[in-house]
Image (spheres, coloured by chain):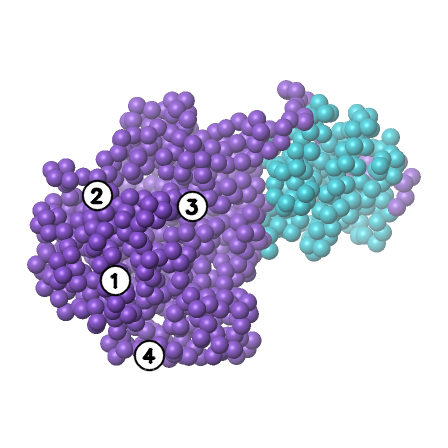
Amino acid sequence: MADPHPFYFLSSAFTYPEYREPRPPVAVLLSLAHDLGLTGLPLETHESFALQQLQAEYVRLFVNAPGGVPSPPYASVYIQGKGILKQQGYEQAMAFYGRAGLEPAETSECEDHIGHELAFIGHLLDHGQFELLDEFVAGHVMAWSPHFFQRLKTADPAYFYLILGQVAELCINHLIQKEGLR
Amino acid sequence: MNRRRFIKMSTATALTIAASTMDGLPGGAGLFRKARAETAVGKATGSMGAKETTSVCEMCFWRCPIVAKVTDGRLTKIEGNPKSPVNGTRVCARGNSGVQLLYDPDRIKYPMKRVGARGEGKWAKISWDEALGEIAHNMETVKKKYGPHALAYFDHGASAENLREIFMATGTENYTSEPAFFQCVGPAALAYLETLGYIATGTRQYNDMAHAKAILLVGSHIGENVHVSHVREFIEGLSQGAKLVVVDPRLSMAAGKATIHLPIRPGTDNALLLAWINYVIQNNLYNKAFVANTCEGFDRLKEEVKGYSLEWAAKICDLKPDGMKAAIELLAKASPNVNIHPGRHATWYGKGDVGRHQLYAILSALFGAVGVPGGLYFPTSVKVGHVECVEQKSKQVAPIEKSLKDIYPYSAMFGTPTADVIKAMVTGKPYPIKLLGVNGVNIMQTIPDPYETMKAIKNLDFIFCEEIMAGETAIWSDIILPEAVYLERYDGVYAYEGLTPYITVRQPVLPPMYEAKSPYWIAANLAKRLKVEGFPYKDDKAYVDDQLAAADLSIDKLNREGGLVTLKGNPYREGKDLKIGTDSGKIKLAVEAFADEDLDAIPKFEPTPAPPKGYTRLIYGRSPVHTFTRTMNNLWLNHEVPENFLWLNDTVAGKLGIKNDETVRLENQDGKRSTPIKVLVTPGIRPDAVYMAHGFGSQSPLLTRAYGKGAADGFLMTNTIADPFMGATSKRTNFVKIVKGDTVLDIPEIVPLPEEIPRAGRQVQAG
């Protein structure tokens, strides 16, 4: 059984960086990257990991930015290609959460945010709900996340988010192979 | 990728994940909890079975009553409120598209603080506490350092009122400098107030097109400028047989339906109106009983306009005398049920703008078309409470030696002229202005000469904005506050004083997304930090309920009535019921108060300078699916009309070798160039003007869909003439050449200019 913790970690890493000490998540990310075979990465923290820079970069990539948010982190933006929030992608995500007997805790984010969906994968792994996991990943996550990761990659992201996107995509792909998902 | 390594994570990864989890990172498993209620799956989609909430639209300022349909916590459809006497179940394209505003990924989601240079668009997300703390700190610091008048507020719309009270409590005289007034309706509002005793045109227009036998539109292009009830009344009037006279240099949508279209030379409308008034008087076409009983100043009017003949005006206006005569006779024949449309956007040429609207009002009065079906009517007073969140005694303007409100005789009653506030920011005279709050207005695209506005912003110590979408103002702000969309908040009570009056309220159909807050919440919490006493209500709902109490209503009661109650109207008045609200109780055909301020009691014709050689005049208007710059990024509306076109006369285009759909730029008299714009070659515009719809050509890269689409008229407006009554700024006093490739093309003069009209110099001095 795959470990849910990387997904919980990735979920956290896709939320706004507010921690006091940026080193642990950076170290985890680089370590995860190393485990996944992403080679040639510096294991030490880079100066671009400074919290204020990460915050500005998070806002640029995911919140508000000149040129528009280059990589909106919401399923709804991609599924059906409407480009707006709370549409079919959101409905799909909410339906999956409901089938697992869960509801999103109150946060300020839309519930089809990549962070929510990665955490949900972690939960399904944690609780051995593989059939639902199969449906969720194959029928929903894979319908939009490759587009999201591609847009993130082409947004010329700061190093942390470049690696984060690659690691998250590799984790999902690996999960599909490991668990024999569709 | 090595599966084995992933399945059995390295010790380092496991340890660090554990460490980071312990570090209290957000996200992760904590994002979910056990469902408290059975989650509905597989419900009907769309608006079927939706929860319906009545509210009020804010996609434009017309504010149609609406019903919002919510399914599974998601807004799925917006329709008109069937109880509404003005729009019924109808909403316009923008009203429908409120869904897209709510769910636009580019909307401002969190309070943000600038971390890059001003204008760079680089921010960090911050808490509300930090954002409001920083604003309060800067307001106090600037006030202490420079005095209260160093604070200024540019505002617009329903959401701006709460924060305005905070600015009033600081003691600044610059608590409102509404571009919607000083760059739009101001001259019209003053003209009607002084002539008829009430503001017949403003946010509301009290003109009864549905029952008119004839309608006159001067420059108003209803149909391109869409407000649902307005268009319905216009169409109703035409379908009942109303004749239509349209005075417009362009074959607008309305002109296309006209009985008579007079394609007038831009800047000469007052000549036509004066000649018409003279013709009406000389030919006894006026309503003698109405004038005798209700008006004053007739003899003076008769004397002052007697020199303006149709033949003279025909030369000035480049119109045929026969057409002018036929038009005024057609209007006179319909008297008194004739609708001299009061217009709204009035800041055209600076000097003659109040006069133009005064002449409309005079024409209405001469026809007796005041307080009658088809003419101008009177608003019915609707009793609702006016609630102030900060007591009046706490909102006294601090003493001031040289006031910006004293520059023009009529600005003080409406606010501080926007252009003079900007001038003070740039020059520090008559006093420095160092802090600006902006709410609900795109100051770069609304106020002419955005280059001067940018200069002014650079001189500020601090600028913040309360916004929904990240327009040009947000780019320049130090702090951005995310305002709840109109579908997520309560606002004031909407008391409609039109033909069938009604009371309704805006109320949230859904809770605010992200960390957006209502205007009331924002102002109340800023007040706490500034130690401004007020905002006594426990929440926004209590604030609205208190206003409704005066009408023996509450939100709950109103909701039981379908969200709207109608009242008996009293729009038409005659005999002793016809009370004119001027100080004399009469309609003033000559406004002596203007003469007391060395202004004309009755407008005189003063020519508006024509374009310099090689240039043409830039005129502008509205797109039917957009509200200024506000809706440009909306998915549905952007899909319908993503960009504007430059209307160019076909003869001029032929001489310049420009083809339909070709992309050009414009260069104005001061060398400012537009972004690229496609050309619409058409005989439907005069050769001495070009036209584009306003609101396009966004310069904010934060607006993904709207950025750089078409051209912005405002960025070509660097020459303004101040209106001498209130300091409103002209917008149709700018001239352009066409730039094709790298070549700047002189515009050929097809229509000769009469000697009475001077030509503007190339570098035109601001008035």
Q: Which residue is mark 4?
A: B752
Chain-order first, disc 1 or disc 3 = 3
Which residue is depicted at the point 31% across and 46% down? B209
Number of the label disc, if any, that sits on residue B326? 1
Q: Residues within 10 Å of mark 3 (few under 14, many from 20)?
A: some
Chain-order first, disc 1 or disc 4 = 1
Q: Which residue is mark 3?
A: B60
What's the distance in space between the residues labelled 3 and 4, CA to CA?
Answer: 40 Å
In the figure, the shade used to draw chain A is cyan
In the figure, the shade used to draw chain B is purple
Chain-order first, disc 2 or disc 3 = 3
Tag 4 and tag 2 share a subunit? yes
Q: Residues within 10 Å of mark 2 (few under 14, many from 20)?
A: many
At label 4, which amino acid type do we have? Pro
Chain-order first, disc 3 or disc 4 = 3
> What secondary structure is found at the residue carrying circle 1?
helix
Q: Residues within 10 Å of mark 4 (few under 14, many from 20)?
A: few
